[in-house]
Amino acid sequence: MKIELPSLMTAVQNAIENPTVVESSYTNSYVFIDHASTNFTGEPLKVPVKITEGTSARVKTVFFSGSTKPENTVYRNSDDER
């Protein structure tokens, strides 16, 4: 059985295309964070992405979390006031 969640798929796509913040993670991995997509407690959507080759990447999971690692920030959207 395949379950489709169109609103979540759209949120994941938006987080990757227009993140608020991108943090480096493990080797060849980044976490794309979208503060515009939140859960009921206000925690932002986080999408871990592993670069596989060139411009190809893999997403295995998504989650909501309020914790951040400012020292790992590699990109911040200029419109973000955090």
Image: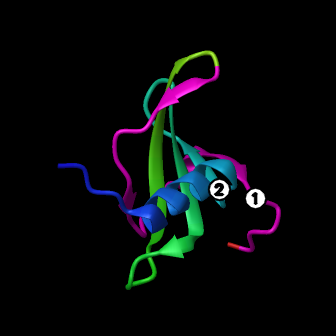
Labels 1 & 2 near each other (Cβ < 8 A): yes
Q: Position of residue 49 (x, y in %)?
A: 48, 37
Q: What's the distance in space between the residues labelled 1 and 2, CA to CA? A: 7 Å
Answer with mark 1 or mark 2, whichever residue precedes in sequence.
Answer: 2
Q: Nearer the viewer, residue 30 or 69?
A: 30
Residue lying at the far front in this picture: please name it. Answer: 1
Color theme of the render: rainbow
> Is 54 on the left-hand or right-hand side of 4?
right
Tell me the number on the disc at residue 60: none
> Residue at left 82%, top 61%?
78
Which residue does the numbered mark 2 point to in the structure image? Answer: 19
> Residue at left 53%, top 71%?
37
Q: Position of residue 5 (x, y in %)?
A: 37, 62
> Residue at left 67%, top 49%?
17
Q: Nearer the viewer, residue 23 or 71?
A: 23
Quadrant hosting residue 19: bottom right
Which residue does the numbered mark 1 point to in the structure image? Answer: 77
Q: Is residue 5 above or below residue 17?
A: below
Residue lying at the far top in this picture: please name it. Answer: 53
- Which structural element holds mark 1? loop
Amino acid type shown at disc 1:
Asn
Quadrant hosting residue 40: bottom left
In the image, the segment drawn in magenta is 55-81
> Is 4 on the left-hand or right-hand side of 47?
left
Can residue 22 be seen by looking at this rendering? yes
Q: Is residue 74 in the magenta section?
A: yes
